Image (cartoon, grey):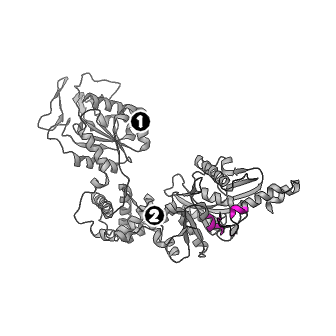
Amino acid sequence: MNYKRLTWTDLQPDILEYKSIFSKIKENYIDPIEKLQPRLINGLAHLYHQKQGFPILLVCIKENRDYLEIIAQIAKNIILPSSSLFGGDYQIINDTIILKPPSDIKHRFTSQGEVCFADWINKELLFGYACIYKNRIHLEPGLIHEANGGTLILSLKSILLNPEIWFYLKRFIEQGYIELFSYNKTSPLPISIPPLPLKLNLVLCGDIDSLYDFQMIDPESYKTAIYTAFEDDIKISNEEDLLAWCRWTVYLAEKYSLPIPEENFWPELIKEGIRFSNDKENLPLCPRWLMRQIRESVSIMGDSLNGKALCDALQVRLWRENQLKENINNDILSKQNLIKIEGKIIGQINVLSTIEYPGHPRLIGFPFRITCVVYPGNNELIDIEGNSKLGGNIYIKSIMIIQSYLMSELKMQLPFVASLGFEQSYSEIDGDSSSLAGLCALISALSRIPINQQIAVTGSIDQFGNIQPVGALNEKIESFFDICNILGLTGKQGVIIPTQNIRHLSLNENVLKAVKNNDFHIWTVNNVSEAIYLLTGKSWKNQEKKEDCLVDIIQQRIQRQNVVPRSAFYNIFRWFN
């Protein structure tokens, strides 16, 4: 068997490997944006050098002010303000409005090619307006006039709420001039206003959903636009990558006038960052997430920003947000939710799962039981969740894979009906992370070999029995550990996870300590046979034929089923021999 029992050093990132760089963060300061956002920089540069076509750049990014401000700063670094003025100077003489070319003096409707951004706009804020106030004509510039000759960065959501804004903006950029609207739509102005020359680069920022909606309302502009994305994570391949990430964090801290982290702050931030990104090789670049860790640490320790401050802040946050998780644990401890963590049971297995409650900030780990019973029938697998409309499409697909794998391994028709169900589950289930556990429960019920209840399982399978990675590993493992820890660790409890998920682990100190002391175990497996052996002590298939394996045991039961006389009385009880 090639399964592996992990050591405590496997459960968190190897921060000691990079410890020497924490003292270099403040030395030879370099702007980290160029290394962290090369695609975004290339997209902006391409926008500025585009001589023909509609000058628009679409950026896949979260739509909040912090992100837009960062894009604006990158744009300012790429292009310098123009020495020329754009727009013009409106003058009202008697009942006539005339437009003069921009002079050396900047007026309200002239611009020097600025970079402007807004996370929310309406028609008046963007285009300005004209109105009559105290019997006099009043002209008010908009954001587009401030950005004239330069770059305008907008959030897509506010445009999508009023698509009319987009088509006006598109028309003005394409025709090269902008018209002022009357503030009162029902009362047009008695005089005409000359259109103002316009030259503008446009950057529209939105998430995947907003970009899709934009594609629906104007597919032509979407197809011809330049596209790029803000990279949410950085892959840590060497010291240079980690140094760039640390300097990015320092850049943000200085920008918001927050303390610079001390050296012992970085290891704790990296651990939490890996939990956020779910990958030991990736660290988050989200400015709001990074600043939240720093701000909450500062609120604990004042001006000191060290590792203890962050640990304390994370503990306070966990306590503040953990009432729902504690209620779930209390239900298990009071035996309202039934979970066995000792002994062996035929056809029952503990599976690691998560619950995502709407409105709750955390993904909650939740162990529960999958059970399987077998009775005489004709090659049928009854999926209780699917039949009761509680199984999603991916879940139903995983059940079909379980059935296909089992039939291909046994190589014979199965004279049984197997009923597979998620106990005490009353909401929809989706995903395939429980397919390994479901298969193991089915094999146990067919072979009549019990499963060790001290071990919980997560993992997806394919039709060849290979184990595939799943998500939310840290929350899943910690949820089962918490139950075992409260009820008492035996030294034989643990979890089975896919081998590929090792890179996603960043577990808390309680789990690390228990694994280090051999009080709790984490095994990784590559295929079904390894998981089955850990759970039952029996081999799935035995090439040397030294002892009966589970495949042999199931096939022998099938053969006995097929040769026994078919009396009505015996048919009822023969499978429960």
For the residue marked with disc 1, what is the amino acid?
A: Gln
> What amino acid does circle 2 point to?
Arg
View extreme (front): residue: 544
Residue 23, horizontal then vertical, whole percent: 28, 70
Against 488, residue 71 (above or below) is above
Q: Which residue is mark 2?
A: 317
Q: Which residues are magenta?
A: 531-553
Q: CA distance from mark 2 to mark 1?
A: 39 Å
**Split into 4 quadrants, where in the image is the C terminus?**
bottom right
SS class, disc 1: helix
Q: Using the image, determine if residue 243 lies above or below residue 168.
A: below
From the viewer's perspective, tell me whether residue 518 is left or right of residue 22.
Answer: right
Residue closer to the observer: 111 or 404: 404
Residue denoted by label 1: 215
> Which of pointers 2 and 1 lies earlier in the amino acid sequence?
1
> Does the stretch in magenta take in 534?
yes
Whole-percent x and y of residue 366? 58, 61
Task: Look at 29% across and 38% down and name the residue there.
Answer: 202
Q: Secondary structure at mark 2?
A: helix
Q: Quadrant of residue 542?
A: bottom right
Image coordinates for residue 144, horizontal then vertical, percent = 27, 36
